[in-house]
Image (spheres, coloured by chain):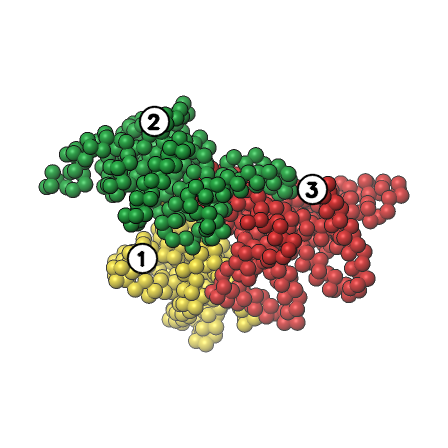
Chain colours: A red, B yellow, C green
Amino acid sequence: MARALKTLGILVALIAVNVLLPKLIPNSYFLRVIMLCGINVILAVSLNLVNGFTGQFSIGHAGFMAIGAYTAAVVTMKVLPGATLAMAAAGVPPIFAHGAALLVATLAGGSLAAVAGLAVGLPSLRLRGDYLAIVTLGFGEIIRVVILNVDAIGGARGLSGVPAYTNFFWVALWVVVVVGVSYNLLASTHGRAMLAIREDEIAAESLGVPTTRYKVLAFVVSAFFAGVAGALYAHYDSYLNPASFTFLRSIEIIAMIVLGGMGSVSGAIMAAVALTVLPEALRGVKEYRMVIYAMLLIVLMITRPSGIMGTRELKLPWFRKKVAA
Amino acid sequence: MQEFLQQLVNGITWGSVYALIALGYTMVYGILRLINFAHGDIFMLGAFIAYYAAGWFGVQAHPSALGALLVLVTAMTGAGIAGFIIERFAYRPVRKSSRLTALITAIGVSLLLENGGLLVFGTDPRFFPQVATVTKISLGGGVTVTNIQLIILAVSVLLMLALRWIVMSTKVGKAMRAVSFNRDAATLMGIDTDKIISFTFVLGAVLAAAAGVLVGLMNPKIDPLMGIMPGLKAFVAAVVGGIGNIPGAVLGGLIMGVSEVLVVGYISSTYRDAIAFVLLIAILLFRPSGLLGKHQAEKV
Amino acid sequence: MNAAGPSLSLDHVSMVFGGLKAVSDLCLDVHPGELVGLIGPNGAGKTTVFNLITGVYTPMSGTIRFGEQVINGCRPHDICGSGIARTFQNTRLFAGLTCLDNVKIAAHQRAHSTYWDGMWATPRSAADERAIDSRARALLETLSLSDVAETRAADLPYGRQRRLEIARALATDPKLLLLDEPAAGMNPQETEALMRLIEEVRLRHHLAVLLIEHDMKVVMTICQRIAVLDYGVKICEGDPDMVRRDPSTIRAYLGEDVA
């Protein structure tokens, strides 16, 4: 009962913010940055499940995001228009109709990305660390090349006209979900099993932890949320291009969790926000942006590879109850 | 059949280039267990240094064998210095850190070289000077090879033989092999591992730069991002051959080059880049230690 | 003390690495409740035997049975599920996690919740947590490690780390415990305490124990039966007195001349 009330409370709060936000922050550029922060937080926290909690090297996250983005776009543009029109005819307010469509599309995108995560994860997760990194990198690139060559979804020209259904409510909701799932796992025996795999896989296996199963699970769940982020992104920019899902994008997400401290959810959140805002702040010196970014990465690795938070969490009162002992 | 043989010639040419780059990857991995993401960008650096050197030495105006050689040596030297600096200031500090930390550092260096290159060299591609007019030589049966291709093959083979001599017949080479077997034991035997690691990086960089110059001869258009795909493909080549294994890198390079050319010739050029990933996934799924590699079991 | 339980039985087990025969045609049994010692010079293949039993390696030939079940070829986590737990020669604790978490992870097998339960913090997940928590704390208490429950495993002194390894192995609820040189690096008092601990644990939990040890005092004092390995071959087996006097054992340890 308490949980149901809490969930309802969160939903109401998010709806309220969604309504108030455009009034409080009339500047649409700031609004855009906030939305992008949210999407990046989903990406970073989900990748953290694999790289941070389970200690695996996945550097192809952008590939899963791409799958989610394109799938969701295809769903809203080709599969659902009939349904949305019917709802409009029945007098359903657009915001509910669009929201429902977005939800369906997002779940579809996330699910397909999760299936891809299974397909990639199952054979590769028995590979040694850096080899897994290369396979995930390769997978991400293959996805991009495949999308590039499929004209039906735009190919190199990109896919435009994706309905702009994403709003603050949806982004914030999914942020809450992915962060909640992460903290819940951390406080459960399953999260501990993932940490054990990170610390010493052989010891974990000999203590009864089915390591491959957990690695694949982490991969699949993480891919799902990457797909969700992609779906949200597609319905925000209304335009998709394979060039947005390159290896570089995967590296940007890696940089976020490394900066935040791999294994720390709060670290990932902070770093995702920081690394979304920073490039925007550096917009003036656009040519130098990537050079500064690169040097930041190198210096960070040399001086403080454990990132801001290491593996620790921000001990806020609400979090404290979740992260027991 | 003739078409196939022609493709083979082209494939072997590209294969030798990939092999030169792959050697650098494999040597560094063998000695440090580090995937040097920035290696492909050294290849690019070599091409650009050669471009500028050609300008300084006036090779464009007065093409000559000596001039070409000078340009090659300059590029190799410059890249060697770059390799030394990168190892010393970016990789050595993270040598004791985790593998992922080193990997990310390597990615950072790669991004730095690429975007630094865009800043310094500009985004417009440059055109590599022609050191000789391209002439076709017939090998019989309708198969031809260009003089450029012969130069590339000759230089590649020479460099690979030189490398083999260094690794197998010199004291430094023996030290390199010792360090890649067991770094701590090598230190205990009195080998200055820092020097050997630096030397390995320089050696790899030198070969990559040579590859850059050779590719510049074949495809005159050079740009700061030209190292990304060849770097990735050469890495795949190294993995296919067995990363850490020097003859493996050569074998992998040849396989990579021939496969790529055959795919472009017989299937479609849009899938040119994809073949590299297909090869990679295939080898990692069926024989992760590579064709010539040995399976490394972890001692429990 | 005669606990009914499965017997471990190695039947003509061999393991080859490259050209090296690490274990040759080994036959060895451990009956329920027994304390068997496995000794031999360095490199004799003792840890390899452990690795074979626990599924880290698959034997080239021969069968390993635990009770009715054939366990060679099974994954290590399944073998743990059958009731075999081990400690490692070089402690393999989860260094960055607390002692309590280390033990909790070992109790993971008995959890009833699924990953989905974990993701959404369902009541089933919470119930699991409570059960695991009390069980882990109880074990720490038994091994006198309660005071360091929240300490990082890496920060413990060596002797207590080895105890933690044993606590962890016990948390998997084993019927057979494989201890790999538990007394390594301990001083005489610590070793004394360890011997008492092993006996206590064995009796309280009705365990069989297979023990690799170099400290002959420990082996001769607590083992009921000893098997001697040399270059992968079992050269002797019997009670401590018999082994102590066996010429081939003496030869293996001290060389040709002394025998």
In terms of depth relative to the viewer, which is nearer, A172 or A30?
A: A172
Q: Position of residue A273 (x, y in %)?
A: 64, 61
Chain of residue at mark 3: A
Density class for disc 2 (Cα within 10 Å; few <14, some 14-19, many ≥20) is: many
Q: Is residue A70 left or right of residue C14?
A: right
Q: How many marks?
A: 3
Q: Position of residue A270 (x, y in %)?
A: 62, 60
- Circle 3/circle 2 CB separation < 8 Å: no
Looking at the image, the residue that sits furthest to the top is C68
Q: Is residue A137 left or right of residue A22?
A: left
Per the image, the residue denoted by label 1 is B184
The quarter of the image holding the C terminus of chain B is top left
Write the residue at 60% across / 44% down.
A221
Q: Nearer the viewer, mark 1 or mark 3?
A: 1
Q: Position of residue A259 (x, y in %)?
A: 55, 61
Write the residue at 39% across / 45% down.
C163
- Circle 2/circle 1 CB separation < 8 Å: no
Q: Position of residue A178 (x, y in %)?
A: 65, 49
Res. C31 mark: 2
Give how far apart the Cα atoms at labels 1 and 3 are: 52 Å
Give how far apart the Cα atoms at labels 2 and 1 are: 43 Å
Per the image, the residue denoted by label 3 is A108
Give how far apart the Cα atoms at labels 3 and 2 are: 55 Å
Q: Decide if residue A151 is in sight here.
A: no
Whether labels 1 and 3 share one chain: no
In terms of depth relative to the viewer, which is nearer, A257 or C104?
A: C104
Mark 1 element type? helix
